[in-house]
Image: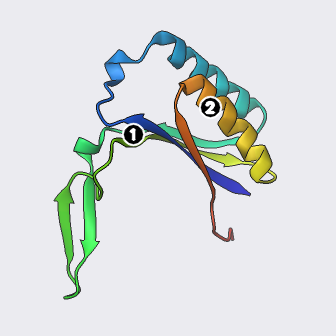
Amino acid sequence: MKFLVTGYLPDDYAPSAQDEEIGRAMHALNTEMEAAGALFFAGGLYPPSHAKTLRAQPNGKVLITDGPYTESKEHIGGLLILEAADMEAALEWARKGAIAGKGNVEVRQIFFHEG
């Protein structure tokens, strides 16, 4: 089973202000997950100001606008795709991620069929 783990950052988050302790903790966790065979993919995201939103229109066209679709006080700052036996196993990794990153994390099972 694969799980999407998203980490949330405050909307005014500045990556240059991230302290080195968080960077080291996240790197150590990624290394641990990789060694355990749980890490499928990990990546950070540019801030929402770099985002584009696409909205299907009734006429069959697509409207493209700058920024996120919804206004929020926080945004997705990064994501992991984990390989885990079940939700409980994914939650164990996510707990470590919340502690390492000192922030909020969401876990969702990915619904797709391989092959």
| Kind of residue at badge 1 | Leu
Who's the residue at 62% across and 31% down the image? 97
Q: Dot 1 corresponds to which residue?
A: 45
Figure check: 40 above or below 110:
above
For the N terminus, which image quadrant?
bottom right
Indicate how the structure is coloured in the image: rainbow
Q: Residues within 10 Å of mark 2 (few under 14, many from 20)?
A: many
Figure check: 49 above or below 29:
below
Q: Disc 2 and disc 1: Cα gap in Å?
A: 16 Å
Who's the residue at 24% across and 44% down the image? 50
x and y percent of residue 39 in the render? 67, 40
Who's the residue at 54% across and 26% down the image? 101
- Mark 2 vs mark 1: which is more N-terminal? 1
x and y percent of residue 103 in the render? 52, 31
For the C terminus, which image quadrant?
bottom right
Taking the view exactly as shown, the residue that stands out farthest to the bottom is 59
SS type, badge 1: loop
Q: Is residue 32 left or right of residue 13?
A: right
Figure check: 19 above or below 50:
above
Q: Quadrant of residue 38?
A: top right
Q: Is residue 100 left or right of residue 53?
A: right
Who's the residue at 79% across and 48% down the image? 88
Q: Is residue 111 left or right of residue 18?
A: right
| Kind of residue at badge 2 | Gly
Q: Dot 2 corresponds to which residue?
A: 97
Numbered badge on residue 70: none
Which one is in front in this view, the residue at disc 2 or the one at disc 1? 2
x and y percent of residue 55 in the render? 26, 71
Q: Quadrant of residue 18?
A: top left
SS type, badge 2: helix
Q: Residues within 10 Å of mark 1 (few under 14, many from 20)?
A: few
